[in-house]
Amino acid sequence: MIEFGLDVKSGVPFHRQIVDQIKYGIASERLLGGEQLPTVRELAVQLQINPNTVRKAYCELEILGILNTQQGTGTFVGNREVEIDKTEKEQMLKQICDELVARGNQYGFTLKEIVIHLNRRSTDGSED
């Protein structure tokens, strides 16, 4: 199961963030075929959003054949493979980098300091 979360500052609509998290969860095999997702109500309470927002995301994924909803039982990950194309991956990476740089700037870090830290982390596996 994946841990759902929303970024209120990203400008990306909440239903789109939910769709993306489910698609990336399936593509990365953190969500497997047949796995049950939280109910609309449960996810809405967890994320503190309107249930219609969750319903919209689930419906979009159901239309694409990615999710299956069984009345009275729940919503499940389908058996359809999900691949994230290169353009979509690039957009996601750009968004992640933009958020990292913006957050770093809030704490007074320069882009150079962030890059140095990331390089150090990638070469020695350091988390600090």
Image (cartoon, rainbow, N blue to C red):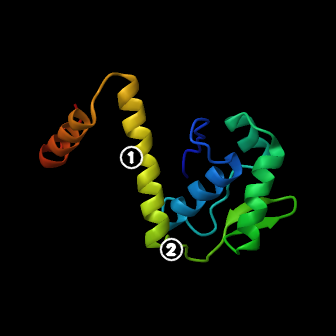
In the rendered view, tell whether residue 79 sits above or below residue 95: below
Residue 102: image x %, image y %?
42, 34
- Residue toward you, 71 or 83: 83
Q: Amino acid at mark 1?
A: Cys
Is residue 64 among what the camera can see? Answer: yes
- In this rendering, would 82 be left or right of 51? left
Seen from this angle, which residue lies furthest top? 107
Q: Which residue is mark 1?
A: 97
Residue pushed farthest left? Answer: 124
Q: Secondary structure at mark 2?
A: loop
Q: Which mark is residue 39?
A: none
Q: Position of residue 121 (x, y in %)?
A: 19, 42
Within the image, what quadrant is residue 82 found in?
Answer: bottom right
Looking at the image, residue 79 lies above or below residue 71: below
Sequence order check, earlier mark of 1 and 2 = 2
Q: Which residue is mark 2?
A: 83
Distance from the alpha carbon under mark 1 to that under mark 2:
22 Å
- Asked whether, in this view, residue 41 is left or right of residue 38, the answer is right
Q: Quadrant of the C terminus?
A: top left
Mark nearest the camera among 1 and 2 is: 1
Is 45 located above or below residue 34 in the figure? above
Residue that appears at 13% across and 48% down? 123
Q: Amino acid at mark 2?
A: Glu
